[in-house]
Structure formats: structure tokens, C-alpha cells
Image (spheres, rainbow, N blue to C red):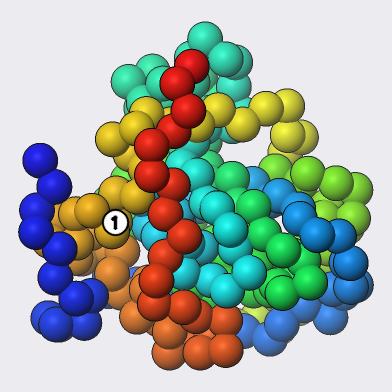
Amino acid sequence: MPLIALPFFSRPVRSQEQPVVIPSPENDPPDTSETAKAVLAGGCFWGVQGVFQRVKGVTSAISGYSGGAAETATYEQTSRGDTGHAEAVEITYDPREVSFGTLLHIYFSVAHNPTQLNYQGPDHGTQYRSTIFPVTQAQDEIARAYIAQLDRAGLFEGPIVTTLEPLDAFYPAEQYHQDFLTLNPNWPYIIKHDLPKIAALEQLFPDDFRAEPALVGLLPSA
């Protein structure tokens, strides 16, 4: 049962890892489409979803699985680490309000640590890998150029290990994983590992931050 929600900043938050202040992408061409999708993986999807739900221009952020087969797209099987799936988040956004490059700026800066190979903090396994699943060729080019740019900048403590993988499909996670950060702000894992990401988002990206998240609510029945 979800605990009673308290305001995010009514208590101190402690981050296992500090966010990194990085430049925005040099290659971020305008997109006049009304809607677009991005699929990003960066450790436990609770925190990644929680971050992008609070970015202006994002209309939906759904936790799920990408990289493996449909029949193994469950939390129980993905948690084994042998399905090929990564815990990922499908982000639907308005490119006229927030660009794909800005989403990557947030992804690399506050949503996760891109220097950790097949783990994030206490979570270990290939299902927690840092991966971008480009939806379009333009996204692939923007992501590759940005990773190269960040490697040249040398602002992280180690090399970026984020991979780019073909997006064969995205499978929404079970209902109890959706909106988990918002519904369970007093969960010890959320307090220690994920609420600091929300605080960093507000501090480092004040023009892109919104306090009211774009929640998933109930997923359509299969």
C-alpha cells in the first residue's frame, strides 16, 4: 500500500551520487513535430520516470522494458539480468517545448550516472545499464554526438559507458511500478536514491522543471 505522500522537500534528501553540471548538446536541431517519443534506460526506472515526469513539455513517461523479447518483459524475469531487457522509460514529449537534446542533457546530468557499467548505485545487472534506444535516425545522431562532446569535456569521473541499442519494442511495466516515486515518497529507496534527483532537476534545470508530474495513472488493460 502506498504511504501517505508528503511534499518532496519537507525533509532532507541525501544523494548517493552528486549530479554533474554539463553543457547542453552542441547538436540539437529544431523539431517542429507536435509529438515525439524517446526511450531511455538508466538504472531503476522509478527514479528515471520520476525525473522526466517533472520536465516541462513531457506529456507521458511510462516505466517498462526494452532490449529483449515480449515473453520476458516482466519484472520477475527482467530482474534475472539474462533477458536482454533494460529497465527503461518511454517518454512522450512535445518537441516544440522540450528538445530531444534537452532530454539527454537532463538524462546525463541528473537522471543517472552514465559512467557505471551495468549498474546504478546499489542495483547491479545488465537490466540497470545506461542505454539510449533511439526512436529515429536523428535521435541516434544527436545522442552519438552528445556522448562524444561529453567525453571531450571530461567532466565526469570516468568514461561514459552509455550504449545505443536498436529499439525493437517497448513494453510497459506492471501497474505497481507506474508513478512509483510519486505514490511512495517515503519509501527508503526513493528517499535515498531518487528524491535527490528531483531536487537536482529543480536546481539545475529551473526553466524545465515543473512541480506537478505528468502521471501515468491506470494503464490500458491488455
In terms of depth relative to the viewer, which is nearer, 34 or 197?
A: 34
Q: Tell whether 154 sits left or right of 146.
A: left
In terms of depth relative to the viewer, which is nearer, 211 or 88?
A: 211
| Quadrant placement of the N terminus | top left
In terms of depth relative to the viewer, which is nearer, 47 or 98?
A: 98
Is the residue marked by circle 1 packed among few (<14), some (14-19), or many (20+) residues within 10 Å? many
Residue depicted at x 43% and y 89%: 203
Q: Tell whether 101 sits left or right of 182.
A: right
Say above or below: 3 vs 69: below
Residue depicted at x 57% and y 15%: 70
- Where residue 27 appears, as percent x and y from the top left, is 87, 74
- Where residue 196 appears, as percent x and y from the top left, is 31, 74
* Residue 146 in view here: no
Say above or below: 15 vs 60: below
Say above or below: 113 vs 189: below
The answer to which image quadrant residue 155 occupies is: bottom right
Residue depicted at x 55% and y 53%: 60
* Residue 212 in view here: yes
- Where residue 11 appears, as percent x and y from the top left, is 12, 81
Q: Tell whether 40 sits left or right of 20.
A: right
Q: What element carries label 1?
A: helix
The answer to which image quadrant residue 50 occupies is: bottom left
Residue depicted at x 29% and y 49%: 180
> Residue farthest to the top?
71
The answer to which image quadrant residue 4 occupies is: bottom left
Residue, disc 1: 181
Identify which amino acid the numbered label 1 is placed on. Leu
- Where residue 122 appears, as percent x and y from the top left, is 27, 51
Number of dots carrying numbers: 1
